[in-house]
Image (cartoon, rainbow, N blue to C red):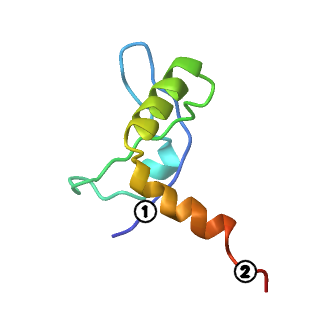
């Protein structure tokens, strides 16, 4: 599988522009797998929602890993 990376933005109608030089690299009719990533760190509500989900998965049995880190002998 070949990969191309580029930056773009979403229009108000929901379209994502494909730069011409990127489009020229993709054969017509070729099936594509599309991954869309964006920086969500600027949204405090999104960040807090992620933290709540992460913390909800924490169980007391996980403390053993913290103990291992804290009790690790120095080398």
Point out residue 3 in the picture as x, y percentages from the top left corner: 43, 62
Few, some or many residues within 10 Å of mark 2 (<14, 14–19, 20+): few
Q: Quadrant of the N terminus?
A: bottom left
Residue 69's disc number: none
Point out residue 34 in the picture as x, y percentages from the top left corner: 33, 47
Residue that extends furthest to the right in the rendered view of this protein: 75
Q: Earlier in the sequence, mark 1 or mark 2?
A: 1
- Label 1 vs label 2: CA separation? 44 Å
Give the residue at x 60% y 31%: 41
Secondary structure state at the residue bearing disc 1? loop
Relative placement, left or right, of 65 versus 72 is: left
Give the total number of marks visible in the rendering: 2
Q: Nearer the viewer, mark 1 or mark 2?
A: 2
Give the residue at x 49% y 63%: 64
Q: Nearer the viewer, residue 30 or 69?
A: 69
Few, some or many residues within 10 Å of mark 1 (<14, 14–19, 20+): few
Displayed quadrant of residue 18: top left
Q: Nearer the viewer, residue 52 or 69?
A: 69
Secondary structure state at the residue bearing disc 2? loop
Residue hosting label 2: 73
Relative placement, left or right, of 66 versus 59 is: right
Is residue 19 positioned above or below 71 on the image? above
Give the residue at x 52% y 25%: 48
Point out residue 27 in the picture as x, y percentages from the top left corner: 30, 59
Point out residue 53 in the picture as x, y percentages from the top left corner: 40, 34
Residue hosting label 1: 3
Q: Nearer the viewer, residue 54 or 31?
A: 54
Give the residue at x 46% y 32%: 50
């Amino acid at each position: 599988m070949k990969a191309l990376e580029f930056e773009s933005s979403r229009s108000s109608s929901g379209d994502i522009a494909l730069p011409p030089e990127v489009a020229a690299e993709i054969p017509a009719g070729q099936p594509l797998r599309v991954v869309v990533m964006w920086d969500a760190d600027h949204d405090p509500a999104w960040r807090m929602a992620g933290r709540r989900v992460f913390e909800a998965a924490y169980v007391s049995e996980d403390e053993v890993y913290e103990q291992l880190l804290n009790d690790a002998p120095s080398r």
